[in-house]
Image (cartoon, coloured by chain):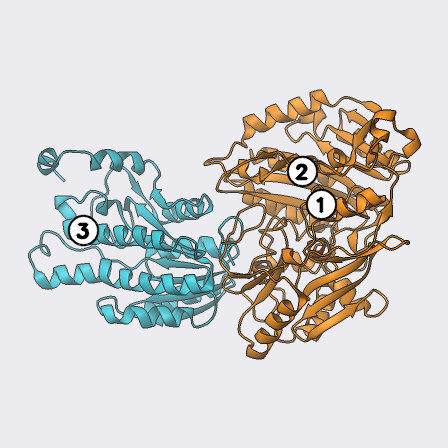
Chain colours: A orange, B cyan
Amino acid sequence: MLSGWGRTSPSAARVLVPTDDDQVVEALNERASRGDEAVIPRGLGRSYGDAAQCAGGLVIQTTGLDRVGEISRDGTVEVGAGTSLAALLRAALPEGWFVPVTPGTRQVTLGGAIAADIHGKNHHRDGSFCRHVVSMTLATPTGVHEVSAESDPDLFWATAGGMGLTGVVLRARIRLRPVETAWMWVDTERHRRLDDVLEALVRLDTTHAYSVAWLDCSARGAALGRGVVDAGDHALLAELGPAVRRDPLAPPAEARLHVPTLPTSLVNRASVAAFNRLWYATHPTRPGRLQHLGGFFHPLDAVSGWNGVFGPRGFVQYQFVVPPERPEVIGRALERLQRASAPCSMAVLKRFGPGDPGPLSFPMAGWTLALDLPIGPPDLRPALRTLDHLVLEAGGRVYLAKDARLAPATFAAMYPALSAFEATRRRVDPQGLLQSDLSRRLRIGPGTR
Amino acid sequence: MNDAFARPASVLVLGATSDIARALLDRLVEDGCTHAVLAARDERRLEEVAAELRAAGPTVSTLAFDATEVGSACSVVDAGFAGGRIDLVVVAVGLLCDQPEDERDPERVARCVAVNFAWPAAALARVADHLARQGSGRAVVLSSVAGVRVRRSNFVYGSAKAGLDAYARTLDQTLAGTGAGITVVRPGFVVSKMTAGRTAPPIATTPEAVARDVVAGLERRSAVIWSPRSLAALFTALRLVPEPLWRRLPF
């Protein structure tokens, strides 16, 4: 049984864990000649919804394709699709290189990073992940393609954010970022109103490479959307004290705590309200703090399997983006969820810079809010439908890597370049063999239901 | 595919002209179901239900069957799955039997057991195969509180439902790890055409309320859905009443 990180819609499939490229190519060729069984790649299963599962079909779990090549002098490196960002950092950081873009966890694969065209706290400056992909090797039902943004822009950008529906990335050459240390200078600002949080993000984005805000979704009325903004930059070697200077490029420590799946959810209105109050109280405004990049970028990696606290029913993460001039959608979204009595255990707000050309790539200039919402409150589903409409009306969209519940028509309206994506897909997969539970649910591709 | 809230895109409804099935269909279509295969005995009524449903948007196809012909279950289910993936199968086949006229009439007892237990159980067995092959999907079976503790006043119907309930719950155990699952629904007395002419007890419910409880129960991933939910406590208590006392109760 496979499910996404939110564990909402598990399904069963055969799983192939290839250890070399040929096994992937063979599996795809075999299915292409028979034309019967659907197939989708999967990495570490960190997409929240049903993107990396394929009920009744074949799931190619790429984690065995984990070779990290030599880092060239210009900072490019060829990496196997199943390599986690954690493994890549372990190899690259001691040599003074950092990943160009990282999400809130290191436990994602390179293939997944491309398939979701992931973004990080530096999106306002550096765009999303695929902007830093020099080339990739893509296995499709019609053959293996060496793809770059120059050689085949349609296929390259369809794969960027294409949720694995254009083929299985075998490996990619990416451009790393040079760093002197594994440490960050972090400025923290706590603000009592949403407008002040937004203003701080705009202001701090001009001076910092990385920024993000945590919002207190329990706060109401005038305090609605109050939060804590973190803005950071890589620390230089000369700025470190003697103690850390001895090993300035030490990679982040691995998780020491593990949460099993609890029999019932610990996330409810009371626990969330208490957590939010505590978090807000313990994160006052504080300039110039030195923090290891593990703690700054990947706070949740300190506890593995943290999705277990949501119990067997699981949770959905709802992440949307709205244009820069429509920040009021953020407050309205928070209010609607409060009216639904839906506890929100985590709300993360970020300002995106301009988006990239991928037709299904999520980021676009504007505000993005991600909300963790346990399944349970009866009004949650209608509330999220309302949010879909607010987001769509504002010209925004919902992130497929998080989605487990969008309606096909709403999805199509949010991603108007869908037909361009479909056209590219038909070129490399005319039979429509590449399918996931997500593509079937959203009716991407031919004849799926 | 079912979404995170267990709302299906496609359904197969066996016994589609029942009031509960129709109420459930209305809700599912409102919540995004776009393809329905409807099966029932009465072809004219079946076409009426299909036409009403089509007006709300989804594509609808129909199948006629007779639940007294137990051998037909397999082919009816196969035909239901022939048009593609089914996310939710609703088994709402059933018939209220007449007591006391039926209880000593072998023909009528056989008929009541066929329609309420044998046919739906045979259909479920086939449904389980299809869902497991799909790697996902759920069947929801309309059982009844009548089968939880069988009462003298409707024991033919009650014992057939008890059999179906036990079969469905245990079949669900065998499906662990396949992506498929079975949910049992135990409504109380439902004011509907099936119960027309009978006196409703104090906690009577409606087809619309049962449909609402089913959708909410699927979303909560309940293995058993009571409708109304308060019946869970009542019937758990009734199940514990000692037999000598039970025999003396007036129902």
Q: What residue type is labelled 3?
A: Ser
Q: From the image, tell me which residue sits under label 1.
A: A86
* Residue sitting at the far left: B104
At mark 2, the secondary structure is loop
Q: Which chain carries label 2?
A: A
Label 1 marks a residue whose chain is A
* Few, some or many residues within 10 Å of mark 3 (<14, 14–19, 20+): many
Q: Quadrant location of residue B71?
A: bottom left
Q: Between residues B18 and A25, which one lies in front from this camera angle?
A: A25
Whether labels 3 and 1 share one chain? no
Point out the tag, 1 or 2, that comes first from the N-terminus. Answer: 1
- Mark 2 and mark 1 in contact (Cβ < 8 Å)? yes
Q: Residue A271 at x, y = what percent?
A: 56, 27
Residue A160 pos. (x, y %): 75, 59
In the image, A105 versus A323, the foreground residue is A105
| Badge 1: residue crowd in 10 Å (few <14, some 14–19, many ≥20) | many
The residue indicated by pointer 2 is A254
The residue wearing badge 3 is B159
For label 2, count other residues whose C-alpha is less than 10 Å away and answer few (under 14), some (14-19) or many (20+): few
Element at badge 1?
A: helix
Lateral position of residue B193 relative to residue A73, left or right: left
Alpha carbons under labels 3 and 1: distance apart: 59 Å
Q: Which amino acid does label 2 sit on?
A: Glu
Q: Which residue in the rendered view is the most extreme toward the front?
A: A246
Amino acid of disc 1: Ala
How many dots with numbers? 3
- The quadrant of the rendering that contains the C terminus of chain B is top left
